[in-house]
């Protein structure tokens, strides 16, 4: 049974902006895979834009899109992080961080004005970004006797697996990466050969 083994993200950092009554909202989007990367980008932006009054953000991680967080960074509750996250969700993106840096212009915008500003700044940055579809891949290690070499390599070639870490001796070993929706089928084909052992390593 086939299932969706793809997700959408951005290919590279991008930026956008929005202005309202003197306030400037500078939006920055980054492709990220871990919270450590999120913290690193936030720290860098706070250093670069140290004189800004707010650094509001939202991020979503993982192909399952279940790891996410947002921050209003001192703005009224729900006026910054939530509209930023709303744009991430409306574009169905993950492995992404959006930070909107605000420079206050002297005029209060009110709750509707703030929501609109953070939403529009984020929308502009996402419009500038190149959105891409990625596949969910799994990495396996396969051990096999030299006699099974031809059979194993034929399966690898036919499946389109990406090979790495090859060792070909009396006892052979290789690492391969394969799309998640093909992994079970390929592993089953490998295990039908005598002496072949397949071990799951990680999902990317």
Image: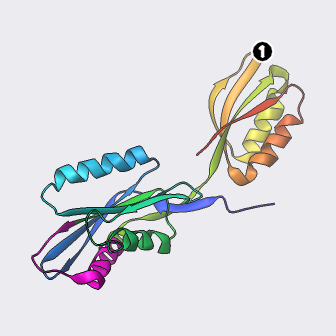
Image position of 1 with respect to 140: above or below: below
Color theme of the render: rainbow
Q: Nearer the viewer, residue 77 or 112?
A: 77
Q: Residue at x 25, y 65 (%)?
A: 74
Picture coordinates of residue 75, whole percent (x, y): 26, 69
Picture coordinates of residue 102, whole percent (x, y): 20, 67
Q: Secondary structure at mark 1?
A: loop
Q: Main secondary structure of the magenta part?
A: helix
Q: Residue at x 33, y 69 (%)?
A: 125
Res 133 quadrant in image: bottom right
Q: Which residue is mark 1?
A: 170
| 109 drawn magenta | yes
Q: Which residue appears farthest toward the top when viewing the image?
A: 170
Q: Residue at x 30, y 84 (%)?
A: 112
Q: Nearer the viewer, residue 138 or 77?
A: 77
Picture coordinates of residue 115, whole percent (x, y): 32, 79
| 189 drawn magenta | no
Res 5 quadrant in image: bottom right
Image position of 58 with respect to 166: above or below: below
Q: Which residues are magenta?
A: 102-124
Number of callouts in the render?
1
Q: Quick one: label 1, few (<14), some, or many (20+) residues within 10 Å? A: few
Q: Residue at x 74, y 51 (%)?
A: 182
Q: Nearer the viewer, residue 8 or 50?
A: 50
Q: Which residue appears farthest toward the left when viewing the image?
A: 106
Picture coordinates of residue 177, whole percent (x, y): 65, 41
Quarter of the picture containing the N terminus is bottom right
């Amino acid at each position: 049974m086939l299932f969706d083994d793809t997700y959408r993200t951005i290919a590279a950092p991008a930026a956008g902006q929005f202005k309202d009554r003197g306030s400037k909202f500078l939006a920055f989007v980054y492709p990220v895979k871990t919270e450590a990367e999120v913290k690193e980008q936030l720290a860098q932006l706070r250093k670069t834009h140290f004189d800004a009054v707010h650094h509001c953000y939202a991020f979503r991680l993982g192909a399952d899109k279940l790891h996410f967080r947002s921050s209003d960074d001192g703005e009224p509750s729900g006026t910054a992080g939530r509209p930023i996250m709303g744009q991430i969700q409306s574009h169905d993106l993950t492995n992404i961080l959006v930070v909107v840096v605000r420079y206050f212009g002297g005029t209060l915008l009110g709750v509707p004005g703030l929501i609109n500003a953070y939403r529009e700044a984020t929308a502009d940055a996402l419009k500038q970004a190149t959105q891409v579809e990625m596949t969910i891949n799994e990495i396996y290690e396969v051990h096999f006797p030299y006699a099974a070499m031809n059979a194993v390599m034929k399966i690898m070639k036919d499946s389109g697996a990406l090979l790495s870490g090859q060792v070909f001796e009396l006892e052979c070993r290789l690492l391969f990466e394969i799309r998640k929706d093909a992994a079970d089928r390929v592993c089953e084909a490998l295990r039908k050969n005598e002496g072949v052992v397949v071990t799951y390593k990680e999902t990317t």
